[in-house]
Amino acid sequence: MHKYLKHVILSGESLNSLKEFESVAVLLASVSIQSQSYSLIDRLANALSSDVVGKVLYEASRNLDTMVRRGNVKIEEKIEGDKRITRVLIYPEPGATPIEIRGRLPDQNTIEKFIEAAYKDINIARNIAAIAMNIVARAHLKSVG
C-alpha cells in the first residue's frame, strides 16, 4: 500500500475503498508519466460527475494500449523475501532507463467497480486522482536518484 493511502483525508468512503482502487491510480500515473501530461489526473481530480470518470478511464486505457504496443510499458513480478512484488516499468523513450511504479494495473472488474463507486460518491474518484498524482511525484523522485 502506498504511504499516501494512510494519510489521505476521507470524505465518506473508507480506506478500504481507496485501497481497492489503488490499481486505477497506478493506471493514471503510468499514463501520465509516459505522456508527460497530468491532464487525465487533473480531469479526474476536478470531476463533477461519474460521466467524466468513464471518459477519463476510457482515454487512460486507450493510452495504455498504445504504450503496450509501442513497448513503452512492461509489467514485472518478482519475489522479495516472502512477498510478491508487482511493478509497472515505464520507458519514456526506447532504450531509456525505466521509471518504476510499484503496484499493478487494474483489470476490467476493478474498472467497473470504480465507475460504480464514483457514481455513488464522486469523492472516491477525486481521492484516487490525488493518490495517482502522488505516485507520479514519487516515481519521478526515485528516478532522479
Image: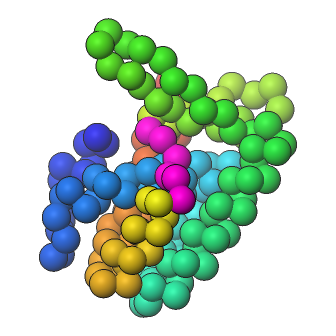
Q: Position of residue 70 (x, y in %)?
A: 84, 43
Q: What stretch is highlighted in magenta?
A: 103-108
Quadrant of the rendered structure where residue 124 is?
Answer: bottom left
Quadrant in which residue 39 is drawn: bottom right
Q: Position of residue 96 (x, y in %)?
A: 75, 28
Relative placement, left or right, of 36 versus 124 is: right
Instruction: Return the x and y of residue 77 as percentages of the image width and height.
Output: 51, 24
Up-down: is 126 above or below 17?
below
- What residue sits 20% from the left and 56% below the top? 16
Q: Is residue 62 left or right of residue 109?
A: right
Q: Magenta residues: mostly which secondary structure?
A: loop
- State the residue at coordinates (58%, 48%): 30
Name the residue: 53% across, 84% down: 52
Task: Give the residue drawn at x 75%, y 44%.
Answer: 68
Instruction: Give above or below for 6 relative to 108.
Output: above
Foreground residue among 67 and 7: 67
Judge from the rendering whether residue 70 lies leftward or rightward of residue 42; answer left or right.
right
**Which of the colour schemes (rainbow, by chain, secondary structure, one colour) is used?**
rainbow
Q: Is residue 10 above or below residue 103?
A: below
User: Is residue 11 covered in magenta?
Assistant: no
